[in-house]
Amino acid sequence: MEKGYSHSRASEHRSRRNRRRLMLVAILLFVVGCITFITIKVSDSKSPAQTQELAQKTDSVAHDPSKVQANADSKGKAAISKDETDVEDGAFVEKYLNQQMLGQLPDGANGKKVAYLSFDDGPSVTVTPQILDILNKQKVKATFFIVGKEANENEHTRNIVKRIVKEGHAIGNHTYSHNYKYLYPHRKVNVDRVMQDVERNNQVLKSILGPDFSTRMIRFPGGHMTWKRRDPQGMAALDKVLLQKDYHQVDWNVLNKDAEGKPKKAAALVNQFIKSVKGREKAVILMHDTYGKEETAKALPQIIEYLKKQGYEFKIMK
């Protein structure tokens, strides 16, 4: 009798233990189910907001190139093209040179070395292509101050102008005629003639490069500084017109003297350049690509290499 009673108690105990286990499993499954349900609901409720936020970010980036740049840089991908960073505002260069000539510390003096290679009086079918080949090989850009009558001489010269732009260089206006007697009769600045010559050159360049082409950069034959000394009133009147039309004249503060004195060999041009560039933080370098300047082309690789070794970066002026 005692043995049967003990067996019954053990069986009842196991039954209760199993019921407790089943209850715990049921509670656990219920809790897991509730958590899963809540998670799905929360996720669903956030999806529209997240979608809207993503759309807003996408729209913002599409309308703000700086954000494209920031996102690209953070991923190590497509940064701003180097060409965009190699362009200097002509107004900056104009002011820098003017302040420097007055003996003032230019506003843009910041310790950063920049070289602005510039070539006057072209294009020529003999020298300009050589210079373009060298610039392409050295991977630097320059500003070409074009003479209209030279640019419009024939199909070859017109194609050279197109090549200048196609290869990423800048074009400035160096008047149509480059005729001192016409532009500066009796060694006086004739404002009307100069501006007519400038606008005539603009029309030539538009005929070659398309109606949308324009340039704010002007370099006067002989240089602004020269005619300001000779005829300060005339140049002051011309400066007012330039300001009204948003033109910016730029001279130079470095030269290799390839248009001064007797013709020079490449080595002499390089030596002269090194003397002239000494101490220049922002170096606006005058050279020429017209006929007879083959030695300039020969000297150019050494000039560029010297600038690179001295820590200069290269920019064009627009």
Image (cartoon, rainbow, N blue to C red):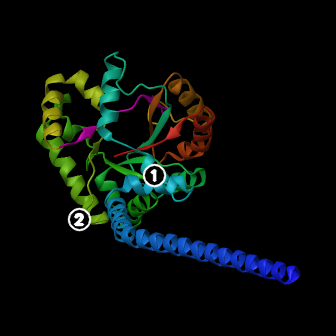
Which numbered mark, 1 or 2, is in the foreground of this view? 1
- Position of the N terminus, as image quadrant, is bottom right
How dense is the environment of label 1, judged by Cα within 10 Å: few (below 14), some, or many (20 and up)? some
**CB of mark 1 within 8 Å of CB of mark 2?**
no
Mark 2: secondary structure: loop
Q: Is residue 101 depicted above or below 95 in this figure?
A: above
248 or 125, which lies in front? 248
Query: Which residue is depicted at the point 51% across and 21% down?
Result: 279
User: Is 309 left, or right, of 143 in this rendering?
Assistant: right
Q: Nearer the viewer, residue 236 or 116?
A: 116
Q: Percent from the top left, x then y, of residue 137?
A: 60, 54
Residue at screen point 54% across, 51% down:
135
Residue located farthest toward the right when viewing the structure as drawn: 3
Q: Magenta residues, as a range?
A: 246-257
The stretch drawn in magenta includes residue 186: no
The total number of labels drawn is: 2
Residue highlighted by disc 1: 70
Q: Which mark is residue 253?
A: none
SS label for mark 1: helix
